[in-house]
Image (spheres, rainbow, N blue to C red):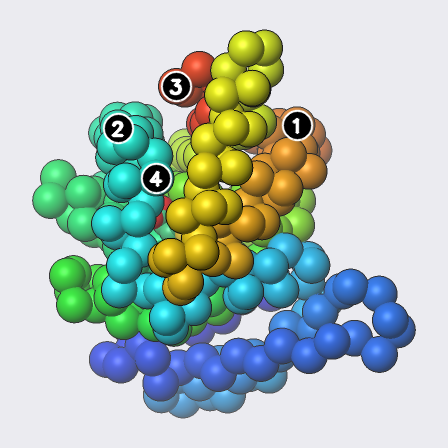
Amino acid sequence: MTFWPFRSSSETFLCQFTKYNQSSSGSKALIYFSIHKSRTTVIALLVLVHEGHAQAMRFFTRANADSYDLIVRLATFGQDIAWKHEITRAVTHRSQILELACGTGILSSILAQRGKSVAGIDITFEYLLSLKRKLKAPIAQGTAEVLPYRDGSFDAIVSSYLAKYVDVQKVIDECWRVLRPGGIVVFHDFTYPRGLIRNLWNIYFELLRLAGRFVTSWKVVFRQLDDVIKKSDWVDQTIGALKNKKFQNINCRCYTAGTSAMVSAEKP
Ligand SMILES: C[S@@+](CC[C@H](N)C(=O)[O-])C[C@H]1O[C@@H](n2cnc3c(N)ncnc32)[C@H](O)[C@@H]1O
């Protein structure tokens, strides 16, 4: 399905209204309901989305939006910014870039400083407000599984820490649609390390759990993030989904002793 692009709208926040309801079937699936309003049209959508939405909505809230940048820097010992520079390097020769789950705009800001034209989408309103304070960019509130952009709008699509919360195949189908031929997708997220590092990683999350007693706005994340990472097989799912969609040059690299990974591919 093709949408009128939000990018043409002067006030992105007015363009979409999102509401999530527990499905009546008793399963953990959620209904994603959105009304897309451009200057000329209103489109209503109902889509069944991944249970990761509920998790993401518990994690990323109004209470922790303002402290996100500091927490992600401290909690990853500065690796977050190094990983984001790797993502930036992967899209060096692309100019029009969409960031999925742009959050508070750390990556979008780096890309914009490098002269890229950046658009962003995220489900958390307060995170987008924080982005808006640091960057003038077209942004939309919505899920990465249903993108409100025209076919062939971007040269590159990037995301960091999204893959474990979504139906990756849906996201990749949408990436294929909104990418131009020759465009690139880059997914980056945490992974559960192997070997000795795994023990250290587990100890680290025990410490984070303790820290959550004092940093209450991050308590839920510090308690549950390790479980979400352990249960996610986003790397294999992403590679499988990219192959299904006939993306080419699929590449996967691990970083910082296997604590995160980046999967990239090109649309032929
Ligand atoms: C850990 S934050 C990462 C923010 C940013 N990508 C970064 O690297 O700093 C995860 C973000 O994913 C967003 N998110 C989770 N599920 C999403 C979905 N289905 N569609 C769009 N954004 C989503 C959350 O709202 C949150 O802003």
Which dot marks residue 75?
A: 4
Q: Identify the element where label 2 is drawn.
A: helix
Residue 235 is situated, as x and y percent measured from the top left of the image, at 60, 29
Q: Earlier in the sequence, mark 4 or mark 3?
A: 4
Q: Residue visible at 23% across and 80% down?
A: 10
Which circle, 2 or 4, is nearer the viewer?
4
Quadrant holding the N terminus: bottom right
Q: Is residue 233 above or below residue 54?
A: above
Cα–Cα gap, marks 4 and 3: 14 Å
Q: Is residue 172 visible?
A: no
Cα–Cα gap, marks 2 and 3: 10 Å
Which circle, 4 or 3, is nearer the viewer?
4
Residue 212 is situated, as x and y percent measured from the top left of the image, at 44, 53
Instruction: List the residue tagged with mark 3.
Output: 256
Q: Residue furthest top?
A: 195
| Image-quarter location of ligand 1 | bottom left
Q: Earlier in the sequence, mark 2 or mark 3?
A: 2
The residue type indicated by label 2 comes to Ala
Q: Identify the element where label 1 is drawn.
A: helix
Instruction: List the residue tagged with mark 1.
Output: 236
Q: Do the numbered discs 1 and 3 sit on residues whose CB atoms are within 8 Å?
A: no
Q: Do the numbered discs 2 and 3 sit on residues whose CB atoms are within 8 Å?
A: yes
Label 4, ligand 1: CB separation under 8 Å: no
Instruction: List the residue tagged with mark 2.
Output: 82
